[in-house]
Amino acid sequence: MLAVQNLEVVYDDVVLALRGVSLEVPDGRIVALLGANGGGKSTLLRSLSGLLDVHDGEIRKGTVTLDGASVGQLSPSALARRGIKHVLEGRRVFKELTTEENLRVGAHADRRNLKTNLERVYGLFPVLRERRDGQAGLLSGGEQQMLAIGRALMSDPRYLLLDEPSLGLAPRVVEQIRDIVVEINGQGTGILLVEQNATMALEIAHHGYVLENGRVVMDRPAAELREDADVREFYLGLGAEGEVASSFRNVKHYRRRKRWAS
Ligand SMILES: Nc1ncnc2c1ncn2[C@@H]1O[C@H](COP(=O)(O)OP(=O)(O)OP(=O)(O)O)[C@@H](O)[C@H]1O
Ligand SMILES: [Mg+2]
């Protein structure tokens, strides 16, 4: 199990981004991490993948543990070798390289199972096989997101950390991404899914957390969160009768802001 206990993270020695967060990602489960802008979702993923350093962030208190052992001070590559892979927000692919070259980069640390992993990725994303020799920069947004996920899968991770994979994608593509996350999970990979699309995330997650201002304000089975009145209103944009609630405008505003920012 991958977990954090009472985690406190500070950026630039001053910005307190996480204020005592505890969260668990059990093996083979999908855990959704929801919350408004600036809540600390990406910071939590960085804490798990060793990427805080890059952002001048630092763990001040608490621990990151893998199977009970503290791993909070390990480098990103050491954590990747232990099976933790982070897919960053904004579908970062090497645009000048071909699709397959991007996937091969994902296997750079361990080429032993390159063929098997490549076949697995092409099995999950047939469109990437079709475009294997094409330049990655010419793929659509959804295909680039698939490539970013595919690249992470090339090391056959035990845990996949996904930061807003559906951001800015058309509803049909969001559904594809959702189905693929389920399929990857079905193959045994544990998933921590950060999503602004709470509806999608709670449809497929086993468990969910809501982060606000660096604190966990909800920690419950996803099925319960789907039914929770506050979650429905603020994160799903639905009132008690399933109607659009007064806060919907805020929810929409939030989504739009995110699209512009991406
Ligand atoms: N590189 C950084 N340097 C300084 N402060 C940062 C940095 N990254 C994030 N923060 C701050 O840390 C807090 C948490 O940000 P974080 O990006 O983790 O939130 P988030 O939940 O991922 O938000 P979003 O929904 O906008 O992606 C915010 O106050 C943010 O301004
Ligand atoms: Mg974020």
Image (cartoon, helix red, strand yellow):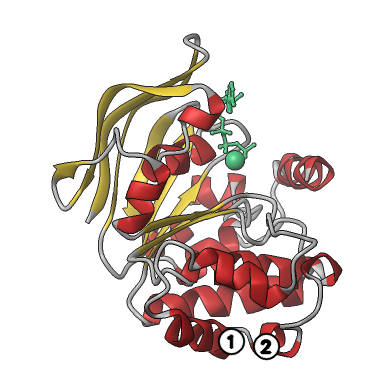
Q: Is residue 213 left or right of residue 65?
A: right
Circle 1: residue type:
Tyr
238 up-or-down from 99: above or below: above
Contact between marks 2 and 1 (CB within 8 A): the answer is yes
* Residue 122 percent location from the top left of the image: 58, 87
17 up-or-down from 95: above or below: above
47 up-or-down from 196: above or below: above
The residues bearing labels 2 and 1 have C-alpha atoms spaced at a distance of: 5 Å
Q: Is residue 225 left or right of residue 177?
A: left
Tell which of 74 and 158 is nearer to you: 74
Tell which of 153 and 219 is nearer to you: 153
* Residue 107 percent location from the top left of the image: 48, 68
Tell which of 157 and 90 is nearer to you: 157
The N terminus - image quarter? bottom left
Circle 2: residue type:
Arg
The structure residue drawn at horizontal position 82% and vertical position 64%, both measured from the top left corner, is 137
Disc number placed over residue 129 in the picture, else none:
2
Picture quarter with ligand 1: top right
Label 1 Cα neighbours within 10 Å, binned few <14 / some 14-19 / many ≥20: some
* Residue 215 percent location from the top left of the image: 40, 29
Disc number placed over residue 122 in the picture, else none:
1
